[in-house]
Image (spheres, rainbow, N blue to C red):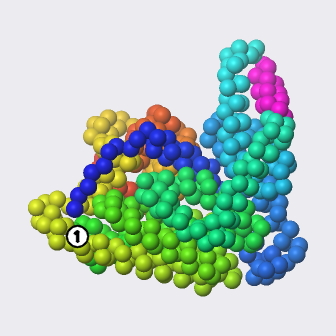
Amino acid sequence: MTTTSAPPTSARVRVQRFGTFLSGMIMPNIAAFIAWGFITAFFIPTGWTPNETLASLVGPMIIYLLPLLIANTGGRMVYGARGGVVASIATMGVIVGTTIPMFIGAMLVGPLAAYLMKKVDALWAGKIRAGFEMLVDNFSAGILGFGLALGAFFGIAPVVTVLSDALGAGAKFLTETGLLPLASLVIEPGKVLFLNNAINQGVLTPLGIQDSAEAGKSILFLLEANPGPGLGLLLAFAFFGVGIARATAPGAIIIQFLGGIHEIYFPYVLMKPVLIVAMIAGGMTGITTNLIFDSGLRAPASPGSIFAILLQTASDSYLGVILSVILSATVTFLVAAVILRASRKRDLEALESGADGFTSAVAENSTLKGSESRVGGLLGTATATKISNVVFACDAGMGSSAMGATVLRKKLTDAGVSGVTVTNQAIANLDGTADLVITHQDLTARAQSQAPKAKHVSVENFMNSPQYDMVVELIKAQQS
């Protein structure tokens, strides 16, 4: 059964880019959140090894360190190191102006401060007398940071506090009334439409961290990250799917459940949109289970791997968290199995006629993510530029790009190619040092604007792209 859909609307694209920007601020700092989670897990009074002295690290980290890291990252994304400095200064005004962790404030004030610094610098660009550049740069940044910190203290902090309290109250209301499972009606379709970054990093993570700071754990970290629904869907395809979808499902399970890359199952839903019902049912089951057992995580689990989930699980929540994964996977599997069995005859007929629904879904997935792949230009024009630094770039520079980098590194090793560095990073962090940048199709234009001097390759699937073999052959030819 094949489906088609309209190209992404401009509104959807804007939301995706907004989610990408939010994710770009959070994801590079996930290690700090994990460190804070471990310190909390070990040393608070209800932790594994309570220690009053070391527990004093918890408060300053969540109040100062984490928001400042987010602000600095957001500032750097907008205006480099200079933007990061001004963003940090301005964010201190929000932090000191309130009594709650200012993650939302940092995500707002940081990029805004860097943008204003960029505009201020543009006012006298090229007009400063020689020898006074450093003086003007330092004082302009200091004065602007001073003003923005005061403005954030008196103007933005109260507004963000009200907004944060309102969002927190809404989440608390849904939790206490048992209505939180209804969040799956938004989260599961949003994930398949690549709005997971906006949902998770933009809303759930800041609220979850604030909730965890007060209660020692938060169910909000599990709303989007639970790998159970994705596991159930892929198991259903492994048993009842047809064609390429059935053949690829077992490998996708390893990537999704163990590796935590949930994007791998999106094409399976897109090939048969009615399967979103199974995903919603599984998501609701997982949330309901965690509500019943009052279970949660101490800190964000990123990526959404079962290993990351268990490492961040609160000491009193293992039963609930494990059951939420098992039950959500079971419910999704059962609902998806019914749907796949009901349409199996039609799917087999379509397969015999040469139409593979999964292939169409990958194309639809690419429609959500961009346009047609092109490597011919690379092979025709890149031979003059020796490729020694290959960068895989994606929204956050972690999940899918990390997988692609691993695949290409193995192909290069198998081909006997050495002396080539293959790394992964966020598009916003491309610094012009890459000789070749590999991205998903819709991200190529943004990558080209960020690294205009590099050669660029677009791919449809980071895990298995024919372009990789062409890149390997090109590098081999250059080295020989």
Q: Quadrant of the N terminus?
A: bottom left
Where residue 267 sits: x, y (%)? Answer: 34, 60
Task: Give the residue at x 28% y 67%.
Answer: 245
Type of residue at label 1? Ser
Where residue 167 sits: x, y (%)? Answer: 68, 56
Where residue 292 sits: x, y (%)? Answer: 61, 80
Main secondary-structure element of the magenta-colored stretch: helix
* Secondary element at image label 1: loop
Tally of numbered discs: 1
Task: Give the residue at x 67% y 29%.
Answer: 118
Give the quadrant of residue 44: bottom right
Give the quadrant of residue 375: top left
In the visual, does 227 lie left or right of 26?
left
Q: Can residue 308 be seen at all in this image of the molecule? A: no
Q: Residues within 10 Å of mark 1 (few under 14, many from 20)?
A: few
Choose between 376 and 297: the one closer to the eye: 297
Region rendered in magenta:
131-147
Residue furthest out toward the right:
53
Choose between 383 and 45: the one closer to the eye: 45
Task: Give the residue at x 49% y 70%.
Answer: 283
In the visual, does 449 lie left or right of 236?
right
| Residue 396 magenta-highlighted | no
Above or below residue 380? Residue 69 is below
Task: Give the residue at x 68% y 37%.
Answer: 112
Q: Can residue 195 be seen at all in this image of the molecule? A: yes
Give the quadrant of residue 404: bottom left
| Residue 133 magenta-highlighted | yes
Above or below residue 451? Residue 207 is below
Residue furthest out toward the bottom:
319
Q: Which residue is mark 1?
A: 343
Where residue 353 sits: x, y (%)? Answer: 10, 61
